[in-house]
Image (cartoon, rainbow, N blue to C red):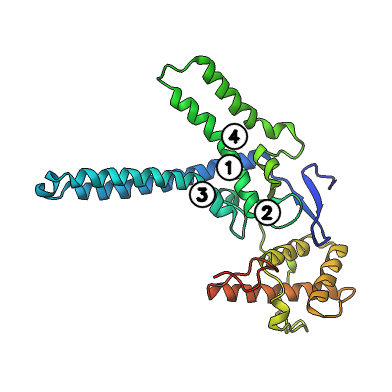
Amino acid sequence: MSRRADPRQRSIVTPEGLTLTFTLAGRGARFGALALDLVFMVLVLVAMLLFLAFLAGGLANLDTQIAKKNAVGQAIQFLVIVMLAFIFLLRNGWFLFFELGPRGATPGKRITGLRIAARDGGRLSTEMVLARNLMRDIEIFLPLAAMGAALGSDASEAFNWVMAGWFLIFALFPFFNRDGLRAGDLVAGTWVVEAPRRKLEASLSTAPAATPAASGYAFRAEDLAAYGEYELQTLERVLREDQDSAMEAVARAICLKIGWTPPGGHEVRSFLEAYYTALRAQLEQGMRFGKRKADKHDAGGTP
């Protein structure tokens, strides 16, 4: 890893031997993304509460004969249990669901232009996302919940100070390492980076994008079956960076994989743009039929 002119830029070498450059997210942007996600979670929770209140109101209006059997009370207790389970799933599942998706970002991160990335340049794994989000419970929710539970109780003042110190240590952790990592990122081997806001088609050229056939390249289905969504995202980053050495390395790797002769000179970018367009079209077509190919190791795609 090497430091570039911008102190937030990092260059990493992927498992495929490619050098990619990322810009680390600022602390303010990360806080803003978390705040937005919490707002969205509260809105979802309120919507669920209103729905359950509507159901409970309907139960309360049942005839008195059913009410005498205490069925209404039992049903309302069940709705309370459903609500508690929903709160648990929402708190733990929100970040996991979105960060395990192809974008690697929650709605809050997408709005602020951020995403999660693996620090080794590889694919973001389920274990990484689980680790960074389980650590969030230790960093934030556990001390806050402990302090909340202690309010109005006989808990000692010293206990509250210990919990407050616990919370502050983890809250200030990003200020004491050069990459601004929270403890969860350090444990999981991830970091939060800025995601390019422009669409690839707009950044590749000012001219309309040519189809693979129009550009002189025609790829067979088996040529495109060699890669999946992760490789498509890697290719997109390489094209955005527009570094000759990286594009030549990627073109050689693709040609070796599909049995083509590597292009040279100005043809390298044309080849990569054509392959990107064809691969994206094939992956999108598969998604329309309920099949997704996560990466080159995903043999048949996941329905």
Quarter of the figure that contains the C terminus: bottom right
Disc 4 crowd, CA 10 A, few/some/many (<14, 14-19, 20+): many
Nearer to us in this view, 154 or 170: 154
Is disc 1 in contact with disc 2, using a CB cutoff of under 8 Å?
no
Compare residues 115 and 131 and report the one nearer the observer.
Answer: 131
Residue flagged by tag 4: what amino acid is it?
Glu
Q: Label 1 is placed on what type of residue?
A: Leu
Q: CA distance from mark 4 to mark 2?
A: 25 Å
Q: Residue at x 85, y 66 (%)?
A: 249
Sequence-earlier tag: 4 or 2: 4
Callouts 2 and 3 close, C-beta under 8 Å: no
Would residue 276 be found to the left or right of residue 58 on screen? right
Could you tell which of marks 3 and 1 lies nearer the N-terminus? 3
Q: In the rendered view, does 115 fall on the left or right side of 178?
A: left
Residue 178 in percent (x, y) is at 77, 37
Instruction: Give the distance between the C-alpha atoms of the residues marked 1 and 2, in whole angstroms.
Output: 24 Å
Q: Is residue 195 among what the camera can see?
A: yes
**Residue bearing mark 2:** 195
Residue appearing at x 36%, y 48% in the figure:
48
Q: Which residue is mark 3?
A: 94
Q: Earlier in the sequence, mark 2 or mark 3?
A: 3
Above or below, comparing residue 148 to residue 26 in the picture: above
> Which of pointers 4 and 2 indicates the residue nearer the eye?
4
Q: Position of residue 168 (x, y in %)?
A: 61, 27
Question: Which residue does the numbered mark 4 point to in the structure image?
Answer: 139
Mark 3 vs 4, N-terminal side: 3
Question: Where does label 1 land, which residue?
Answer: 134
